Amino acid sequence: MVRRMKNGGITRRLGIMGGTFDPIHHGHLVAASEVAHHFNLDEVVFVPTGQPWQKADRTVSSREDRYLMTVIATASNPRFSVSRVDIDRPGPTYTIDTLRDISAIYGPDVELYFITGADALAQILSWRNTEELLELAHFVGCTRPGHTLRNPGLPRDKVTLIEVPALAISSSECRKRVAAGEPIWYLVPDGIVQYINKRGLYRDP
Ligand SMILES: Nc1ncnc2c1ncn2[C@@H]1O[C@H](COP(=O)(O)OP(=O)(O)OP(=O)(O)O)[C@@H](O)[C@H]1O
Ligand SMILES: O=C(O)c1ccc[n+]([C@@H]2O[C@H](COP(=O)([O-])O)[C@@H](O)[C@H]2O)c1
């Protein structure tokens, strides 16, 4: 949807759903869809992380596998897209770089809404350049089973907390289930079950 501003300009609202997506699951997709509805977003860009520095203690699947799974999971939704900005940037992934790169690609007339779950929002003060982050985007925290959703101390006009349908799904649990030979049907889109099988991902615990 195109919105005319008082000065005659046009503004679009863009959601950004950042994540490691190892693998992407229905919890991610529902959060993005709900936030898109709540804010009447024109598009939600999923941005798989390159090197998630706060997950340095664990093995993460290759960037290309996580990127392709994100493309497969979002392909059927005309308002969802996937960006390579984080996976193509060497070094640790910082959201400040994500927001700068996306702003540069989409131009000045977009409002950015960065989407997080309750657990990620709780960590935001540990992220790089928190102050500048708040200048570039509005932050949206979504409820997530097992986590308490609260504003971690950001200015009130910079963050919105919204309740989304509760899906007690995590990528860690999906990986554990695959390693144990348990099904992940209906926790992730069908194409992701098939991609994980085809590539033999997560078989070793
Ligand atoms: N079930 C869920 N409901 C709401 N938000 C979620 C859910 N799962 C993940 N998110 C949010 O999606 C974003 C990306 O999450 P991420 O890719 O790290 O998935 P994860 O399930 O938390 O992974 P892992 O279990 O490996 O830590 C984060 O902001 C996270 O809070
Ligand atoms: O900018 C940071 O320092 C920072 C630290 C941790 C996480 N993030 C971002 O938060 C999003 C969710 O990350 P994760 O690790 O929970 O998949 C993803 O877009 C990350 O790049 C960002």
Image (cartoon, rainbow, N blue to C red):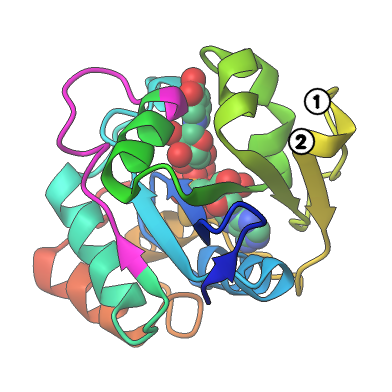
What's the amino acid at mark 2?
Lys
Residue occupied by mark 1: 154
Residue occupied by mark 2: 158
68 or 115: nearer the viewer = 115
Count every numbered label the image shows and give the total.
Answer: 2
Above or below, comparing residue 8 to residue 38 in the picture: above
- Write down the quadrant of residue 155 in the picture: top right
Check if mark 2's residue and mark 1's residue have beta carbons within 8 Å.
yes
Horizontal side, residue 93 vs residue 39: left or right: left
| Residue for point 15% across, 36% down | 88
Would residue 85 be counted in the magenta stretch? yes
Decide: few, some or many residues near mark 2? Use Cα within 10 Å; few <14, some 14-19, many ≥20.
Answer: some
Would residue 71 be counted in the magenta stretch? no
Query: Residue 96's x, y, as percent?
Result: 45, 24
Horizontal side, residue 68 vs residue 101: left or right: left
| Residue for point 39% across, 57% down | 46
- State which region is magenta: 81-96
What's the amino acid at mark 1?
Leu
Query: Residue 150's x, y, as percent?
Result: 87, 39
